[in-house]
Amino acid sequence: MKSLRRLRPVIFISCILLVVLWQSFAFAQDETSVAGIWSLSAQGVSVGCTEHTPCQAPPGNPNLCGTAICGSFQMGDPHIHVSQSDTTLSASEGDINGILFSLAGNISGTQVTFTIVGNGITPGIGNATTNYIGTLSGDNITGNFSGFGSWSYPDANGNLITETATWTGTFTVTIEQTAVIDKILGIKKPGLIIGIIGTNFGDTQSDSMVHIGRKTFDSSSPRIKFWTDTEIRIRLPNYQCGWFKGRDYRYRRVWVTVDGVDSNKKRIKILKPSTCP
């Protein structure tokens, strides 16, 4: 009986730990995924500037960077590859006009917040920051945004003009739940297995494919060792010494095709084996 009494606190604490672990697991299982291709459409008004500045987008482009920095504008991008790790959102790429930007955000329940920084997806012609706060409903996020930026450019007389502006408006994101690669793990050497980490790969491979440069690997390939919705493990091709052309490494892009739709591409650095001259 004395031994049982001594064990009671240990049993009680163990039960609490099991409950906490179960709740954590349940939360992770119920976590909402918004990873995929985002189509962002936004419209608003910009104030505080002194001159109308040109838009980065070509004339007639429906995804404008801004019809004019002073006054009403539209901006957006139909193909933003957003990754999700737990509740953290991220993207870093060029917009529809090839102009770089980065996205960082978070999802909590149905509330989605994200910030876009860079020269892309902005009503101005320089580096800017725009904060978005929205509500998720089905495959759509709707809400409001606010942003600011400052940039300089020469006028017709060669004088340097500096503008500072702020903008506000509303936005809609439509999410296409496609495969998104977040990162690629492992030592990148010929014949070694790497791990492709991301979302929406599908629970089984089926007719999906992995691409490494010009090489494609379908479900018949023995190189694919493991496939889940969030991870793929594949053995790299056995590149021969001559393939490296005297270099210590070569780059190749990796991407996944699921249901006929390509994921984003990640570049990996394949190292020359130590056995090569």
Image (cartoon, rainbow, N blue to C red):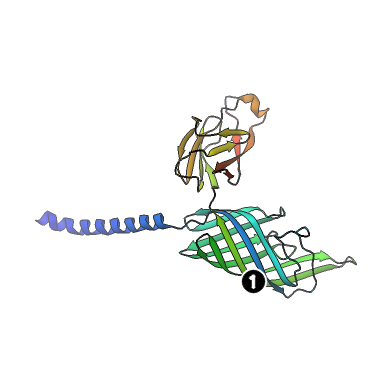
**How far across and down, in percent of the image, does residue 160 sit?**
84, 67
The image shows residue 11, relative to residue 255, as above or below, that is: below
Left/right placement of residue 10 relative to residue 185 reads left
**How far across and down, in percent of the image, does residue 79 sit?**
63, 54
The image shows residue 203, relative to residue 7, as above or below, that is: above
**How far across and down, in percent of the image, does residue 53 sit?**
79, 67
Left/right placement of residue 64 relative to residue 178 reads right
Q: Residue drawn 64% across and 27% down?
A: 243
In the picture as drawn, the residue positioned furthest to the right comes out as: 157
The image shows residue 190, relative to residue 27, as above or below, that is: above
Left/right placement of residue 134 relative to residue 120 reads left
For the N terminus, the image quarter is bottom left
> Which residue is tagged 1?
169
User: Amino acid under label 1?
Assistant: Gly
Q: Quadrant of residue 213?
A: top right
Q: Residue drawn 58% across and 45% down?
A: 261
Q: Quadrant of residue 173?
A: bottom right
Query: How many dots with numbers?
Result: 1
Q: Please rate how many residues cluster around mark 1, counting C-alpha atoms within 10 Å: few if below 14, some from 14 to 19, many from 20.
A: some
**How far across and down, in percent of the image, does residue 41 sit?**
64, 63
Give the structural element (helix, strand or loop) at label 1. strand
For the C terminus, the image quarter is top right
In the picture as drawn, the residue positioned furthest to the left comes out as: 1
Front position in the image: 214 or 16: 214
Q: Residue drawn 25% across and 56% down?
A: 14
